[in-house]
Amino acid sequence: MPKLKIGTIRPTMEEDKAITKAALSDPDALPLTDDQLRQLKPMRPRGRPVGSGTKVQITVRFDEDVIEAFKSEGAGWQTKMNGALRQWLLEHRRA
């Protein structure tokens, strides 16, 4: 069980029972049945999406106008830059 923050006040057993009773009597907030809980599925997995492969973090210098051109495209500019470099590599790869 996680530790509580300093100063956290927990309800007494009587208060907890009163809270639970009030919650159960609310027709708009009925608890889910075991069957309903089993049928729940996450809307999307937690964390970052799976990448297209192994990436390597490096430091590299580009001309300011090159970076600004890619950044002006908005979100995903680094992915677009990677795609442009990959395209160049495919077109210039020696046989």
Image (cartoon, helix red, strand yellow):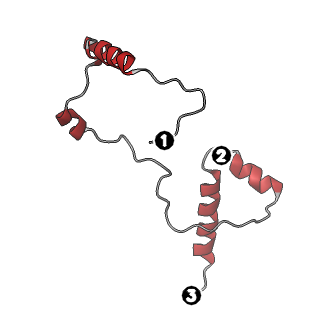
Residue 57 position within the rendered picture, expressed as x and y whole percent measured from the top left: 66, 65
* Extreme residue in the bottom direction: 95
Q: Whole-Å distance between the Cαs marked 2 and 3?
A: 33 Å
Which residue bears the numbered disc 3? 95
Amino acid residing under circle 2: Glu
Residue nearer the viewer, 19 or 32? 19
- Farthest left residue in view: 35
Looking at the image, residue 86 sits to the left or right of residue 16; the answer is right
Q: Is residue 6 above or below residue 16?
A: below
Label 3 CA crowd tier, 10 Å (few <14, some 14–19, many 20+): few
Pair 1/3: label in front: 1
Side (left or right) of 86 relative to 70: left
In the image, what residue type sits under mark 1? Pro
Q: Which mark is residue 2?
A: 1
Please state, as top left, top right, bottom left or bottom right, where the C terminus lies in the image: bottom right
- Disc 3 marks a residue whose amino acid type is Ala
Cα separation between marks 2 and 1: 43 Å
Q: Which residue is mark 2?
A: 73
Q: Nearer the viewer, residue 15 or 53?
A: 15
In this rendering, the answer to whether 49 lies above or below 12 is below
